[in-house]
Amino acid sequence: MVGRVRLWGKRFACRVRRARRSVDAGMTTVEYAIGTVVAAAFAAVLYKIVTGDSIVSGLTNLIQSALATNW
């Protein structure tokens, strides 16, 4: 009886290890494509925000005031 239980346990452990190896551990091609599209869209939004007139003028004013300080 004990021998059967041990044999069953070893077989079960082998099945579990085999199942873990066959699980998809990475992203599929579709997930890469969606991730790339999302990243590109996020970059486009950031570009629009940073190159907007208010941001550019605000950064320009900040840099000019920092350079114009008297020591």
Image: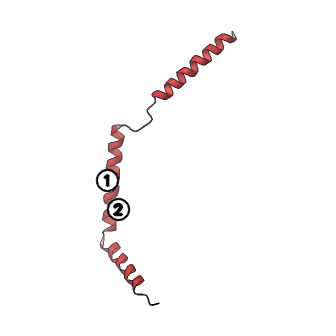
Relative to 36, residue 29 above or below: above
Q: Is residue 54 left or right of residue 3?
A: left
Tell me what residue is drawn at x 50 percent, y 24 percent: 18
Looking at the picture, which amino acid does disc 1 mark?
Ala
Tell me what residue is drawn at x 46 percent, y 30 percent: 23
- x and y, in percent, of residue 22 in the image: 45, 27
Which secondary structure, mark 2?
Answer: helix
Relative to 55, residue 44 above or below: above
- x and y, in percent, of residue 32 in the image: 35, 42
What residue sits right under mark 1 in the picture?
Answer: 40
Q: Is residue 67 left or right of residue 4?
A: left
Marks 1 and 2: in contact by CB < 8 Å?
A: no
Tell me what residue is drawn at x 33 percent, y 57 percent: 43
Q: Nearer the viewer, residue 47 or 21?
A: 21
Which residue appears farthest toward the bottom when viewing the image? Answer: 70
Q: Alpha-carbon distance for marks 2 and 1?
A: 10 Å
Looking at the picture, which amino acid does disc 2 mark?
Leu
Q: Which mark is residue 46?
A: 2
Q: Nearer the viewer, residue 58 or 22?
A: 22
- x and y, in percent, of residue 13 in the image: 58, 22
- x and y, in percent, of residue 39 in the image: 35, 52
Q: Earlier in the sequence, mark 2 or mark 1?
A: 1
